[in-house]
Image (tube, helix red, strand yellow):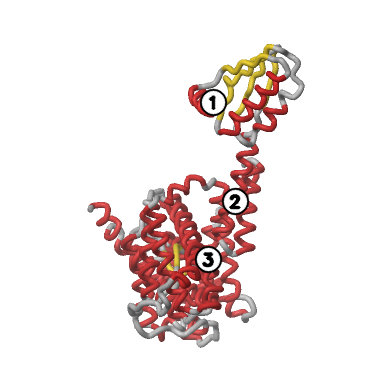
Amino acid sequence: MHTLKQQWFGNVRADILAGIVVGLALIPEALAFAFIVGVDPRVALYASFAIAVITSFVGGRPGLISAATGAMALVLVNLMADHGLQYVLAATVLTGVIQFILGWLGVANLMRFIPNSVMLGFVNALGIMIFITQLPYLRGHDAMTFIFAIATLILVYAVPRFFTAIPAPLIAIVVMTGIALISGVTLQTIGDLGKMPNSLPTFFLPDIPFNLETLKIIFPYSLALSIVGLLESLLTSQVLDDMTDTESDKNREARGQGIANFFTGFFGGMAGCALIGQSMINIKSGGRGRLSTFTAGAFLMFLIIVLGDVVVKIPMPVLAGVMIMVAATTFNWSSFKFLKQAPKTESVVMLITVAIILYTHNLAIGVVVGVILSSLFFVANISRVTVTQDSNIYKIKGPLFFASTTKFIQSFRDVKEKDIIIDFEDSQLWDESSVGAIIKVKQKLEEEGATVTIRGLNSSSEQLYGKLL
């Protein structure tokens, strides 16, 4: 109870102010994601509101911001084009069910298999992507656009040196918006991106046939959404753990993401997950507790319903400036040192992870490829088994498993001795392939008239050998 109270009310002022900043930053992102999918802006805005509010209660990482995201939007493009909004909402509901089940089964335990090099690639790619997504709001515009963006950046970096009671991004947004309105300068605004809704979301069932054919249509999308959403959410949660030097319940976060998506689909919202950019804004602005996430979602709806006429006047170069600051702080600048000092294989994994994420704009693909590549390098590295001969004794050094059995077998190709001892004191048998390789070598040598003795097996290796012999 004390922990829950601390998570909600241990950082009230900072959490509320940080949530206000995030609420402002969620609007252009949601509008952009609605455009990607091809849905009404309300679908993404309602999703951002519902997911943020629900995860503030049931999520496992205080301070994590979840809402409509680009990664999920990309998965939904074809479903929307082929079948329409009602199927998108149904897929969102099913996504929630799948994510809750995966969280209940302990999917977050798989996080330990993601190497540091992949995590670095994930973070750096996100930093670069956040920066790239702001460029459309800057390129092709006049000099005033760049002036406002640069002035916003200066404020964001300078204000904390003299004043920390209010988050610098919030000060920058208010000050620069005020200057734009007073001066009458013409800039692209939030209102240029899409029309704001003027009512709260309401509960309804997706208008689809409830049959097996519908399930066949939405299940592949829901499964993809579940994997992408959990991967991005759990990795973002880990990044925030490292930033704040705190721990979080990632299986609870997985279940929380599922609950949020399940209910969001019934309120006209598209599937979403954690947002690294907005989560970073929250943390950098002082947000640490659940109240910051709740405030972000609640203030987002307050902005678009009550203050919509004011919000639409906020210049996009100002929000772009804030997001560029987030991009700069998200990117791990020590990665350049990592590239020089780390083993070449790990550097390659990090660079390839970054490249694939930037090329596909899909975090899940980049991370999965990075993990697979890292695993292949690891297998190649540990499969270097050596066989040394001392008279009639052949000493095996290194783990013997499916990737190292070929070299092991080849080492006994031209054996001349008739009384052979194979010593496994410095080795370990890991799988059926290793036992099969020993049996194959032993049978071959015995067919040639040799006597073969196996010795030095540790208890686990001997147990495996005896079981499969």
Q: Is residue 428 left or right of residue 284?
A: right
Report which residue position mark 3 lands on.
71
Is there a contact, CB below 8 Å, between mark 3 and mark 1? no
Closest to the observer, 332 or 158? 332
The picture places residue 181, in percent across and down from the top left corner, at 47, 85
Question: Which quadrant is home to the C terminus?
Answer: top right
Name the element at disc 1: helix
Secondary structure beneath dot 3 equals helix
Q: In front here: 55 or 148?
A: 55
Is 215 placed above or below 1 here?
below
Q: Amino acid at mark 1?
A: Tyr
Amino acid type, mark 3: Ala
With respect to residue 412, does 255 lie above or below?
Answer: below
> Residue shown at 28%/57% (left/top)?
10
User: Is residue 171 something that shows in the picture?
Assistant: no
Do labels 3 and 2 touch, CB within 8 Å? no
Numbered tag placed on residue 370 in the rendering: 2
Q: CA distance from mark 2 to mark 1?
A: 34 Å
454 shown above or below 233: above
Identify residue type, mark 2: Gly
SS under mark 2:
helix
Residue at 54% across / 58% down in the picture? 364
- First in sequence, mark 2 or 1: give its number: 2
Q: Dot 2: few (<14), some (14–19), or many (≥20) neighbours within 10 Å? A: many
Please state the horizontal and vertical placement of residue 329, each as a whole percent of the image. 52, 58
